[in-house]
Image (spheres, rainbow, N blue to C red):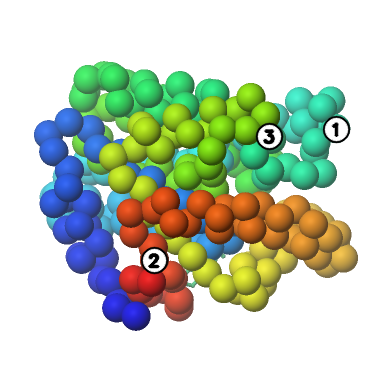
Amino acid sequence: MTAMSWGHLAERVLADAGPARYLLGVAGPPGAGKSTFATGLRDALNLRLGQPMAEVAPMDGFHLRNAELRAAGTLARKGEPDTFDAAGFVENLRRLRDTPLGAPVPWPSFDRAIDEPSPGGVVFADHRIVVVEGNYLLFEDEDGQEWSAVRKLLDACWYLDADRRLLEKRLLRRHVRGGRTVGAARVKVHESDFRNADRIAATRDRADLVLRGHQGRYYLN
Ligand SMILES: Nc1ncnc2c1ncn2[C@@H]1O[C@H](COP(=O)(O)OP(=O)(O)O)[C@@H](O)[C@H]1O
Ligand SMILES: [Mg+2]
């Protein structure tokens, strides 16, 4: 396995990016470290560029609201593909692509403290590089959700992988921190998160680059 420094990773993006806004996807299972990686890559890019020209666009901001999930009976399996507003996500990716640099494009974030999406996330304007991170960037269409449109709107898509035991440890911690009992967290991980992780793993071969994170470092798979 080859270790990739932040400098290497940033160079790889910059070698591929042109003058137009560039969208890099980072897909992978829940707990793989996508959000952490996307932030690190953004910082490395901004350091290289000497200006804040890169920013993260999380797919998490397109979680459906809890009230909506409760009404649909899907709250317990929050995190699965049909608990996201895939169409809204695609529409906003398209807006990022189609809007000229300098004009504002607001992007929602996900507030883990209240477990709800928050419209007041980041506003893209002069950002030439967008690191789009989320679970289902490499999915096919299903149940009326047009996930396949996502990959078409990305210039490239990487995949961040992690061992199942590591995912389990991180996800258990996340759910307990979020207020679940250890038992309920275990059920959530094994009956929901891991089912998603299996389906996401089946999309890994579509990625342009597969990375594995370990103790704060990233390796080419
Ligand atoms: N490369 C890494 N080395 C060690 N811990 C990491 C690494 N990447 C992420 N983590 C930890 O794993 C947990 C999940 O990371 P996160 O970025 O939230 O994953 P994701 O967005 O894929 O669900 C967090 O607690 C984070 O601090
Ligand atoms: Mg995340």
Three-letter code, disc 2: Leu
| 3D distance between C-alphas at marks 2 and 1 | 35 Å
In the visual, does 184 lie left or right of 116?
Answer: right
Kindly identify which residue carries mark 3. Answer: 82
Residue 73 has which mark? Answer: 1
Quadrant where the N terminus is found in the figure: bottom left
Quadrant where the C terminus is found in the figure: bottom left
- Kindly indicate the quadrant of the structure image that contains residue 47: bottom left
- Kindly indicate the quadrant of the structure image that contains residue 171: bottom right
Answer yes or no: do the residues labelled 2 and 1 have beta carbons within 8 Å?
A: no
145 or 190: which is nearer to us? 145
Answer yes or no: do the residues labelled 3 and 1 have beta carbons within 8 Å?
A: no
Of labels 2 and 1, earlier in sequence is 1
Three-letter code, disc 3: Asp
Q: Residue at x 44, y 71 (%)?
A: 213
Residue 46 appears at what percent x and percent y? 22, 50
For the question of whether residue 119 can be seen, the reply is: no
| 3D distance between C-alphas at marks 2 and 3 | 27 Å
